[in-house]
Amino acid sequence: MKTPERQINAMQNQKGLLWFFLIIVLAAELICNAWIRSESNQAMIMIAKTESNIRDMADYRQALGVEIERLKSEARITRIARTRLGLAPDIFNETIYLPKGTN
Amino acid sequence: MAANPYEKFGLRILFIRFFLLLCLVGIVIRSFDIQILQGEALKKKAENTYVRRITIQGDRGLILDRHLNKLGASIDAPNITADPTQVKNARQTADRLVKILGGSRAEMEKKLSQKRRFALLASRVSPTKAEAVKKLNIVGIYTPDNSKRFYPNRRLAAQVIGFTGKDDHGLEGLEFSYNDFLEGRTLKTQEHRDGQGTILDTGKNKRDGLKGGTIVLSLDKKIQFFSEQALEQAVKKHRGKSGMALVMQPSTGELLAVAHYPEFNPNNYGDFSRSRYRNRALTDAFEPGSIMKVITVASAIERGMSATTIINCENGNYRVGRSVIHDTHPHDYLTPGQIVKVSSNIGAAKIAQDIGPKAMHYYLKAFGFGAKTGINCPAESTGVILPLNRWTSIDAVAMSFGQGMSVTGLQLVSAVSAIANGGKLMKPLLVKKVLSNTGEIIRENNPCVVRQIVSAKTAGTVKKMMARVVQEDGTGTQAAIPGYRICGKTSTAQKAAKGKKGYSDSRYTAAFAGFAPFDNPALAILVVVDEPKQNHYGGIVAAPAFKDIMARSFNYLNIAPNTDMIAALPREVSHAAD
């Protein structure tokens, strides 16, 4: 008579373990899912921030390019040369052409 | 009989199983309800909190000179917008925003308290301000990208480039005529936001692909600057009303400079009179005066007149019908070359009478007068040449020395370039290339010969005549540059009198047109000063500006003198050596 009881107990234990295992799997799946979702969200935020930084840098570079053009403007350079440095036009670059034989 | 304990357990387990199954069924049913039955409605509700539909616009394309220097560019200038329905505390938010953006707090609060989903709080602010607003991290406040047009060289070539309005749409100049290429495209996309309110604006990455095309001009920034500077000096010195200077490459028709004075700053065009906006080199027609004598003489020589023909210049007075033509200085007998050199009206009139009105009309048209050049700039004028059947006896005669007709500066410099280019009229070129935002060539404008007007031999003969104008006793000696053989022609045209027939005695157009070096003309230049008061002769008012532009351009382009000259040391150093 003892043998069937043991067999029943063993079967009950097996079923319990099976359920426990099933619940563990489900819980693990849920945890994994939550972890992956939060990680992917985090990654998306990081990507978005990096892209935003890249764009800002590109915009900044573009603005600097325009600023260089503004600083290179002949009108501005000439004005600074005249008003701040007191230079007259073409003093240093002026080339005088003399007829052959004058030297 | 009491129930077996195993049976009791079994019953309980069955009950729990049933209960769990019931829960599972409940979950499945609820899940079905949420995901399928209410799915769409809930999705939209959720999207409203974390997805925002936005419209992004690409930057306007660049305008570059021939060496790819930026003449017009767009810079980042974001807008500050709000979704008032998401803003929790309008007063507090307004306070924080006003500290960064400035302006009235009450007005800001009013905007944030509206029951709409969009409010523009500030337009085109500096990127620093936008960044500061972003850092506040207020729910419902956004900083969508936007751009502002900026012209780094300010006034340089302003009339040619034009400007854009507040909506970034071209209003004047090339900004207007090439708006379709330059304007950035728009795209409707979505902006995402996470649970903490962080904006995941990955949709904006598409903005680069929406950028407008780029146009590459034939203008040379440096030559443009030389021209504007020389023109300004000429107009100011002789107290002129306005002026223009055009520089063209005769062999290609490419315009290297189109200068105007007075100019304006397209970055704040609203501060200037509207009359300054237009590209007068194309839109304003004027009586060209004596420069037309070159055309008259070229036509006559092409029709067989000898360059050594002697023409009686009637000692300064010549009657044609009821009109009397005068010369500034009386002359008796002159050759066509001398007529060009001393600018004799009577000589030119007699040449025109010799070739006849029909031929005169034909050659004027052949040189491109009375028709658009096709340069693709807004409001180009054709000038005025009356149809041949409406010409009176005086018309052909008057046109021979540039009165009774009107031309644009562009037509005139093209005609003079044709003489420099062996009689070939080139189509003027201002836009060399149109590029897509990826750098591919969409359109390339290559030099185009419109027609061969006169033979290369005739053009060569006329060139020699024009070279004498700048030599001793000519009218254009002030255009001479040591070491270079310059060809040119002065013009001093009386303007039509206001409110009466005939010409004014006090209002003139002074001009000088020419090209150099003689053997291989690299540049053709036209300088026009309108209504100079200090002096009105083209040889005194416009010729020095011509010389200034030509000399500085030769220096810049490394065009060596065409006579046997040697370079000496700069003056400062040679003085020190003495």
Image: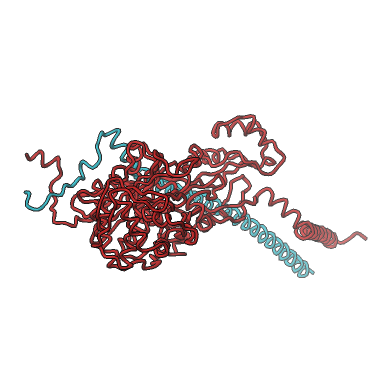
The reply, left or right, for residue B420 in relation to residue B128 is left
Question: Residue B421 placed where, x, y %?
Answer: 31, 63
Q: How is the image coloured?
A: by chain
Image position of B455 with respect to B320: above or below: below
Location of the C terminus of chain B by quadrant is: top left
For residue B138, above or below residue B379: above
Residue name at image x 36 percent, y 66 percent: B453
Specify the chain shown as cyan. Answer: A
Residue A46 location in percent, x, y? 52, 51
**Image coordinates for residue B260, horizontal then vertical, percent:** 40, 45
Question: Residue A21: which quarter of the image?
Answer: bottom right
Task: Determine whether, in the image, residue A7 is placed left or right of residue B459.
Answer: right
Residue at image x 72%, y 55%? B43
State the residue at coordinates (66%, 36%): B111
Q: Nearer the viewer, residue B434 or B377?
A: B377
| Closest to the observer, B493 or B18 | B493
Quarter containing the N terminus of chain B:
bottom right
What color is chain B drawn in? Answer: red
- Viewer can see residue B103: yes
Can residue B441 be spotted in the picture? no
Image point (51%, 58%), residue name? B181
